[in-house]
């Protein structure tokens, strides 16, 4: 009868060697991107978006890095490149609001705050976001809250 502990150690050693050699735990799947279609279904836009790299991606982070109103992506990968920047250069026909919250006594970063933005042109539908301390695996997006306002250039209230 074979020692179960030695079989476990043998398999663990093979797994460690696979990782050391740059092998993928995900089976070399391409990265995926999906588009929400009218809140009813999702369509894959992986290829046309340019996000379908062979990277073994683990931690995408969205941030308006160049402060132009559209969200850019930083992606941490287990394999090379370990960090990839994907700049969003969408047409700038719409409006946006970026907010950075600051507490005055405790919770200086405003973690847990819920913000409602009411665009003036919207049909009484607020845009709602909550500031989180972390929101991904091995990653954390910006503490700036980004609100896409579309064609609405004015805000009723925040």
Image (cartoon, rainbow, N blue to C red):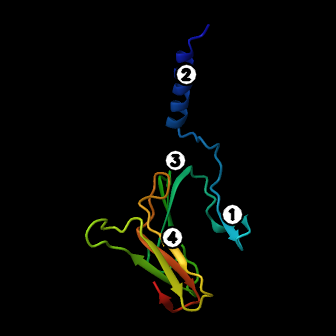
Q: Going 67% across and 62% down the picture, which residue do you hit?
A: 46
Frontmost residue, 55 versus 43: 43
- Label drawn at residue 8: 2
Residues at marks 4 and 1, CA–CA distance in whole angstroms: 17 Å
Q: Going 38% across and 75% down the picture, which residue do you hit?
A: 100
Which numbered disc flags the more N-terminal residue, 3 or 1?
Answer: 1
Residues at marks 2 and 4, CA–CA distance in whole angstroms: 43 Å
Q: Is mark 4 on a helix, strand or loop?
A: strand
- Label drawn at residue 60: none
Which numbered disc flags the more N-terminal residue, 3 or 4?
Answer: 4
Relative vertical location of residue 38 with respect to residue 136 in this rendering, above or below: below
Percent coordinates x, y for residue 37 in the rendering: 72, 71
Please tell me whether mark 2 or mark 1 is closer to you in this view: 2
Q: Mark 1 points at which residue?
A: 47
Residue 142 vs residue 148: left or right?
A: left
The quadrant holding residue 50 is bottom right
Can I make out residue 65 in this image?
Answer: no
Residues at marks 2 and 3, CA–CA distance in whole angstroms: 25 Å
For label 4, the crowd category at 10 Å Cα-Cα, with few meaning under 14, some 14 to 19 and many 20 or more, is some
Is there a contact, CB below 8 Å, between mark 3 and mark 4?
no
The quadrant holding residue 125 is bottom right
Q: What element carries label 3?
A: loop
Is there a contact, CB below 8 Å, between mark 4 and mark 1?
no
Q: Going 41% across and 78% down the picture, which residue do you hit?
A: 99
Residues at marks 3 and 1, CA–CA distance in whole angstroms: 20 Å
Residue 66 vs residue 105: left or right?
A: right
Q: What element carries label 2?
A: helix
Percent coordinates x, y for residue 71 in the rendering: 51, 72
Frontmost residue, 92 versus 113: 113
For label 1, the crowd category at 10 Å Cα-Cα, with few meaning under 14, some 14 to 19 and many 20 or more, is few
- Label drawn at residue 79: 3
């Amino acid at each position: 009868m074979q020692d179960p502990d030695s079989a476990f150690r043998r398999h663990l050693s093979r797994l460690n060697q696979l990782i050391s050699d740059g092998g993928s735990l995900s089976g070399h799947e391409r990265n995926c991107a999906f588009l929400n279609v009218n809140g009813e279904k999702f369509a894959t836009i992986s290829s046309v978006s340019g996000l379908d790299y062979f990277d073994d991606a683990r931690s995408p982070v969205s941030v308006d890095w160049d402060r132009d109103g559209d969200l850019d992506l930083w992606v941490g990968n287990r394999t090379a490149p370990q960090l990839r920047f994907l700049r969003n250069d969408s047409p700038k026909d719409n409006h946006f609001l970026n907010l950075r919250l600051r507490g005055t006594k405790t919770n200086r970063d405003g973690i847990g705050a819920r913000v409602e933005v009411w665009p003036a042109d919207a049909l009484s539908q607020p845009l709602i976001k909550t500031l989180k301390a972390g929101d991904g695996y091995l990653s954390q997006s910006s503490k700036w809250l980004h609100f896409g306002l579309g064609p609405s250039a004015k805000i009723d209230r925040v």
